[in-house]
Image: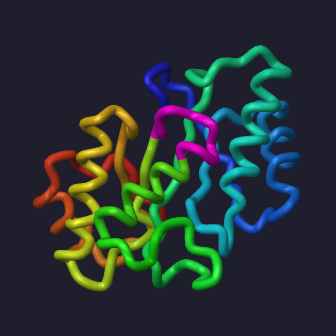
Amino acid sequence: MLANERPYIIYGTAWKKDQTASLVSQAVRAGFRFIDTACQPKHYNEAGVGEGWTAAAFELGLDRSDFFLQTKFTALSGQDPNNVPYDVNADLEDQVRQSVKKSLENLQTDYIDSLVLHSPMEELDLTMRVWWVFEELHREGKVKQLGISNCYDFRVLRNIYGMANVKPAVVQN
């Protein structure tokens, strides 16, 4: 629920490929204002999301503040090895920063409403290294809230919650 107690539905953008911009634009014209994507070219066309929401916003006279944009950082193991949106040789923290920078560019915005870890890393210490960069981005104002996706082990979620300074606001499963 939103602060005004109105429910919302997030428009998902996976697997829409070359139709992403058109479908996102149609969704916005139909009333969607919450959009989910990922910096994962294997399954998402994040730049198409940016193109779609901005075109529809212009057409309808809407501002950035009328939208809720959620994207995800996806670890190397979830990426197409031939199309990774960050430097595969960079350390994990820089991969996260590069991914978010690419998301901001793709989505044509200067902030992300919700940044989600696409799934926990193989080890808790790696997950927390990602999370602490998320927190850094939150402090910088580039990200408004943090979350995690595909977290099916409650113990993992509890550990992240216990170690995080900025608590997960979203669990997307």
Q: Position of residue 87 (x, y in %)?
A: 46, 71
Residue placed most toward the observer, 73 or 160:
73
Residue placed most toward the observer, 4 or 148:
148
What is the image's colouring? rainbow
Q: Where is residue 82 in the image (x, y as percent from the top left)?
A: 64, 83
Q: Where is residue 17 in the image (x, y as percent from the top left)?
A: 81, 65
Vertical placement of residue 41 versus 112, above or below:
below
Q: In this view, does 95 lie to the left or right of 53?
A: left
Q: How many marks?
A: 0
Q: Is residue 147 left or right of residue 107?
A: left
Vertical placement of residue 96 versus 31, above or below:
below
Vertical placement of residue 127 versus 171, above or below:
below
Query: Which residue is at 43% across, 74% downward?
Result: 75
Residue placed most toward the observer, 151 or 53:
53
Q: Does the magenta stretch include residue 79?
A: no
Query: Which residue is at 40% across, 58% downward?
Result: 171
Vertical placement of residue 146 versus 126, above or below:
above
Q: Is residue 110 magenta?
A: yes
Q: Is residue 67 left or right of residue 154?
A: right
Q: Is residue 27 left or right of residue 127?
A: right
Query: Which residue is at 62% across, 39% downward?
Result: 34
Q: Position of residue 114 (x, y in %)?
A: 45, 44
Query: Which residue is at 71% across, 47% downward?
Result: 49
* Residue segment shown in magenta: 104-113
For the view shown, which residue lies furthest in the top direction? 61
Residue 158 sits in which quadrant?
A: bottom left
Residue 140 sits in which quadrant?
A: top left
